[in-house]
Amino acid sequence: MKHLIIILALLWMDISPSFGQTVIENTNHLPEHEYTLTIKKEMVQKAGKKVMGMTVNGSIPGPTLEFTEGEFAIIHVKNEMNVPTSIHWHGILIPNYYDGVPYLTTPPIAPGTTFTYKFPIRQSGTYWYHSHTMLQEQSGVFGSMLIHPKKKTLVYDKNLVLMLSDWTNEHPKNVLRNLKRGNEWYGIKKGTATPLSTVIARGALGAQLNFWKQRMEGADIADVYYPAFLINGQQSASYPDLKPGEKVRLRIINGSSSTSYWMTFGGSSPELVAADGKDVVPVRHNKTFIAIAETYDFIITIPSDGKIELRAMAQDGSGVTTAYFGKGTLLKAPIIPQPDKIKMMKTMAKMNMKMGAPALKYRPHKDERYQLQATYGMHMKGMRMNTKSSSSMPQMSTPTTNTPIQKMVMKKDSMPMKKSSSMQGMAMYADYNYDYLKSPQKTEYPKDVPVKHILLNLTGNMNRYIWSLNGVPLSEADKIKISADTITRITFNNLTMMHHPMHLHGHFFRVLNENGAYSPLKHTVNVPPMRKVTIEFYRNGGDEYGDWFFHCHILYHMMSGMARIVSYDSPRDSRMTKYPESKLKKEADRYYGWSTLEVASHMTSYSYVAANIRNQFNFDATYGWNKNLESEVTYQRYLNDYVSLFGGVHIENTVTDALHQFSTTAIAGIRYLTPYLFQLDARIDHELRPQLSLSRSILLFPKTVLSGSYEYQADFGWVNTLAAGQRYEHESNWSVGLSYFLSRNFSLSASYDSRYGTGGGISMRF
């Protein structure tokens, strides 16, 4: 019987005798459509500078690949770089082996080699492709896909693909390094930082203290500074050749690495006809939020004498990109106000909200997802959370999307009718929902199919820039096991202050909204801060096998741990034997190093840090022109977000103002990030001398940081001999300083240190 089952499975999956190895050939003799994509490094002109980028067929973005539903795609990807690369086909229903995630589903494309993707086109709509190797997507390895339907069902004259993207002149690895070191520069450069002086002037000190108490600097919207936002590679694109009266289907793709946009149109509201490649019931919709990796199709009619403006504003208001359709009098798009982060902080501070859910747990393999849900997030007064296991919950037929009161139970007569601060907080994110999307056909699944409920709390730590699910980053996570015979229902509970566009490879899922049985199908769903969104999927057109990647599509979040592997628990493709999936996990747990050199009139100091998610190596050295020298080397192991253990060696001169005698001591201790963001260091050396130190830095003015530290060491004579009559000896040191940002890498500094005196100079960051 066992052998019969295996034979039937082989026939059903159309695989070779090497079990799990899918052979994709055009056995049905479908019309073939063939492309070649060449990826190379070359100088590109973007945002007013010529920098090294990665191009696809010589351009950024790469070419639009056009197919018709029912064709067979053959795409040769040629790597002419000196590093491996890959291509993932975003939103495409595709055999697992060709999904394009290196080390998980598809081999990396080695330098100087070509990999050929082969798959049948089983859908129509607007899609895109991009590299899934490290941070290459940010460098330019992405492009669009347009798949025409077998039969046209909508009335329009032309297609126009518009690809949104963000551009940095920095190397993407340096961007991620800068985020992990906690540099304030990106917020300062964008003008979105909230210095203490502004907070006080706006009457928001209480709100700021509330955030600090929960170990958060403030409300955050976007992490990275970009000098340019682009449409089809340009900061402003124009299409004057479109003729009056023409109906144009705009196929808009957000191919940005970490920017979502608010889109508005001039003239009459456009007709929204598709989302993520799937048709929706047409609706007039002007102000539209497009998250990273989503696609939306609109039909516009070119006016007889005028040009329509499309305005896409970065979500944090730090920049815009525009496109114009037609010619004549400009029909301006409405301008959306820049978000007010301080106002957001004040609103949140009034709510019964607990922030700071851990991105890194002490015991990563202990299931604490329901405890996280009950402890953190928005808990409305007069209501209590139902934290029962989701497997005991009844099947929901028409749950509401993006409602923070989902799974809550009302207490009798406990909710007053007046608008509470919690309700105000809900209204703050009221625009971020999918209720305007309705499928033309029913999408609900059979009622008799069992449902597997999965809760994924979205968790993050901005201080160390770690992002995770249920407090567990990818490198420490188990696979999410699913079955083709079960409806998989996932509830995202966002416990962070940022939006997260969650993407499941190779699948479409229902986004459960107020349209119930007609809830839309999508491949990427945006989850707003402190909100819940529920999705579900069942059967996938025959691709219910293998492992599939599931992650936040903010590139720097994915590469910092916010990802999972969803597995049908089937045998791995034998062609992947030489490519262990452990390498995929290691990509999100790489070491990043940074250093700081300060040269001043009274001292010179140098520090170097190399860290991944759990481990950190530190080197610090300070030399005073008064001939005082101190240095330290430590290894630090993080137990969770806020607590770490460390050990190492400390060296300093033992005679003040003289360098002829040094002491070397072994040290060990604990470091703790306290509420209000003080860094506490408690240690003891091999001479059994305990020491406590406390340090803190605050963005005081838009470019000025105030920092200070205090340390106290005592010697109780447990090893050393004290002077006669003394019960203990002690030493204390303190420092205070100001630094003024000139750029990301340079600051002017002035400080006083009780060991080295007063002076000023320049700080350099590497």
Image: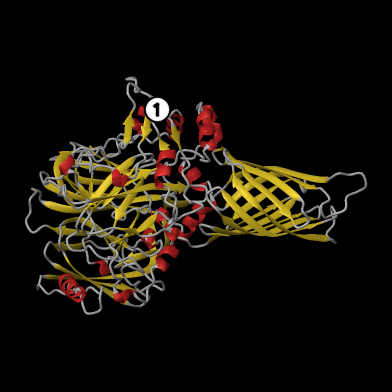
- Across and down, in percent, residue 285 comes to 20, 38
Q: Is residue 512 visible?
A: yes
On the image, numbered disc 1 is attached to which residue? 381
- Across and down, in percent, residue 521 comes to 20, 49
Q: Is residue 358 above or below residue 140?
A: above
Residue 351: which quarter of the image? top left
Q: Is residue 470 above or below residue 595?
A: above
Nearest the viewer among 132 and 389 is 389
Q: Is residue 649 left or right of residue 5?
A: right
| Location of the N terminus (image quadrant) | bottom left
Question: Given the image, on which type of amino acid does mark 1 rest?
Answer: Lys
Residue drawn where x is 43% and y is 61% of the image: 51
Q: Is residue 116 left or right of residue 593?
A: left
Residue 555: which quarter of the image? bottom left
- Label 1 neighbour load within 10 Å: few <14, some 14-19, many 20+: some
Number of dots carrying numbers: 1
Q: Is residue 321 visible?
A: no
Nearest the viewer among 285 and 568 is 568
Taking the view exactly as shown, the residue that stands out farthest to the bottom is 17
Taking the view exactly as shown, the residue that stands out farthest to the right is 724
Residue 739: which quarter of the image? top right
Residue drawn where x is 54% and y is 36% of the image: 213
| Location of the C terminus (image quadrant) | bottom right
For label 1, the SS is loop
- Across and down, in percent, residue 532 comes to 33, 41
